[in-house]
Amino acid sequence: MNNDSIIVSNLTKKFTFQVKNKASGWLKNLFFPEKKEIVAVNNISFSVKSGERIAFIGPNGAGKSTTIKMLTGILFPTSGKINILGLDPTKDRKKLAYQIGTVFGQRSQLFPNLPLTDSLEFFGVMYDLSDSDIKKRIAELIKLFDLGSFIDQPVRKLSLGQRMRAEVAASLIHKPKIILLDEPTIGLDVVAKKSLRDLLLKINREENTTIFLTSHDVGDVEFLCERTIVINHGVVIKDLPTEELSTTFVNEKYIDLIPENIFNSFPELPEGIRYSLKDKDKIIVVVNIKKINIQESLRKLLNIFEVEDIDVYNVDLETVIRNIYERN
Amino acid sequence: MKKELKFALYAIKKNIQSSAELRTSFLMNIVGMAINNIAFIIIWMFLIKSVGVIGGWTAMDIVGLQGFIALSYGTILSTANGLRKIADYTASGALDRFMLSPKNLLIRIATSSFGVSAIGDVVFGIVCMVIYSFAISASISQIFLVLLLLIISTITFLSMIILIYSTSFFFTDANTVTSGIFELFFTPALFHGGAFQGVMRFVFTFFIPSLLIGTLPVEIVRNISLDKLLLLIILTIFWFIFSIFIFNRAVRRYESSNFMTFGN
């Protein structure tokens, strides 16, 4: 039996748009505009097993959202094939909608003026659930997502973190087999992010829901996803277990050093630490934590430099992706 | 289909509830539109008193015309106001959430918004039709004819709204374009029916069906013209099928976008 819930084969999406030809007059540009074509997704193929947690990452404009929109039937592919749970999103969009849940971080699907419970009920009716099933499922979701304290508040009065929990809850009302999330933690504070990640992990474990997620947040990828697909310029450039991707950026930590006055010299650093930026007002060093741990590196750095402030942080995902991309 | 209609009615109910949450704005919109329409018809009455009957059209015909138009306009743009937002939905990418729905896309879009001010048109339309029916001493058969014509007029108006706003998928600045096309269709519908003769009548019956939603229904009631009724039914069926066809073709051009949006 085929255990794949998503199979994408040679998927391509091209967009065309009009461009102004500066060499031509405005009349020619008005009636005979030149057209330019961009390839947003270029011949990508991958498959996702049932119950898997996939991060689909890449820099802005890489083709992540376009791919997710083709998977859900919002956009029609220029070429290639998509099979989700045996359905073709271009032909079976309505049938597919019963099987999948979607969350777009920057877009709400709830009624802003009505209490949250009304929106949940609305989605229950939309998915043809009976009245008793709707009540039962809402009660389950209230418990699972801890919505009880704000279930009767109008959605417009919820905090962003509460709203995102509500969005995910609404997308799960019909117990979808796959949930596709596009930047679900965008704009959330660290507490709300953690809460949302915990919930997603919980529904994956308890209901075996396949999770397909795009995010710019390293934490989402590290905490939630067992496998990561990296896309750039519309092409899949890496498809690997997240652990392997993690080693790329967990091996290195960045440390910002702010001087008490100014840095006058830049002496040689201990083994495992190298300069990333040498400036009178700021030094950035990169620590290879396989060679030297953070505590030891901080102690050694403080012996060398007189500093007013220190900041330790991971390399951002964009850099990781850029490194991977540059290597490929 | 039963499930689709049940959901459509439920969505309309939720939209009314959502709009009614903002009570002051809700009531102001309805009352404001009703006053606006009353002012409009008073101007027509004064005009007709001054110039007399034109092309066989009396003051009561104008009341009937306004009734047909206000009722078709009010019914569609209250319950199916989402259609008028297609241009915004396509520009902002908000159409995504309707495409993710397991329901019929057109019905889902149509019932995504409730046009509160159009309730004022419905109220005004009912008042006009009651006055009109009394003024022409309508028989039982004429009353049934009026009701049938109201349904036909509403379907034609719905078809034109679908058709006009489906053009949003073809243009970047769709709001301006759709507003322009809507005015081209709707403004002549409000004109004195007697003013349309010859080529003008032909154009605004067969190419731009403005006369189908008010002028022809009034003339059919006045003259009990079965030929015109048959023509009206055929044209209504044509425009309805054509508008659905164009919508289904147009929606394939949707390219989505990533603007932030809120609400249902």
Image (cartoon, coloured by chain):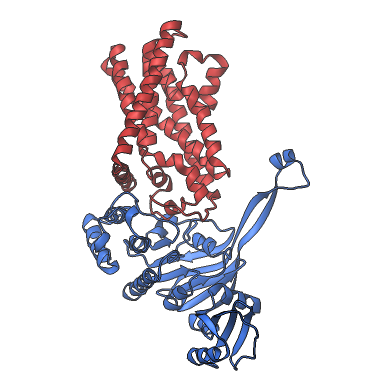
Looking at this view, name the residue that lies furthest to the front: A261
Q: Nearest the camera: B133 or A244?
A: A244
> In the image, residue B74 lies at what x, y percent?
37, 31
In the picture, the quarter occupied by the N terminus of chain A is bottom left
Q: Nearest the camera: A2 or B15?
A: B15
Question: Would residue A62 appear left or right of A168 to someone viewing this image?
Answer: right
Vertical order, A164 against A223 (above or below): above
Image quarter of residue A26:
top right
Image quarter of residue A9:
bottom right
Name the colour assigned to chain B in the rendering: red
Whether residue B223 is visible to the viewer of this picture, yes or no, is no
Looking at this view, name the residue that lies furthest to the right: A23
> In the image, residue B246 lies at what x, y percent?
52, 41
> In the image, residue B205 lies at what x, y percent?
51, 23
Image quarter of residue B154:
top left
Q: Please name the residue shown 64% across and 53% down the image.
A: A16
Instruction: Spot the blue chain and give its letter.
Output: A
Vertical order, B100 against B127 (above or below): below
Q: Nearest the camera: B117 or A37?
A: B117
Vertical order, B44 against A60 (above or below): above
Vertical order, A237 against B200 (above or below): below
> In the image, residue A289 lies at what x, y percent?
53, 89
Q: Nearest the camera: B234 or A270?
A: A270
Question: Would residue B54 appear left or right of A142 to someone viewing this image?
Answer: right
Q: How many marks?
A: 0
In the picture, the quarter occupied by the C terminus of chain A is bottom right
Whether residue A61 is visible to the viewer of this picture, yes or no, is yes
Question: Would residue A107 appear left or right of A28 to someone viewing this image?
Answer: left
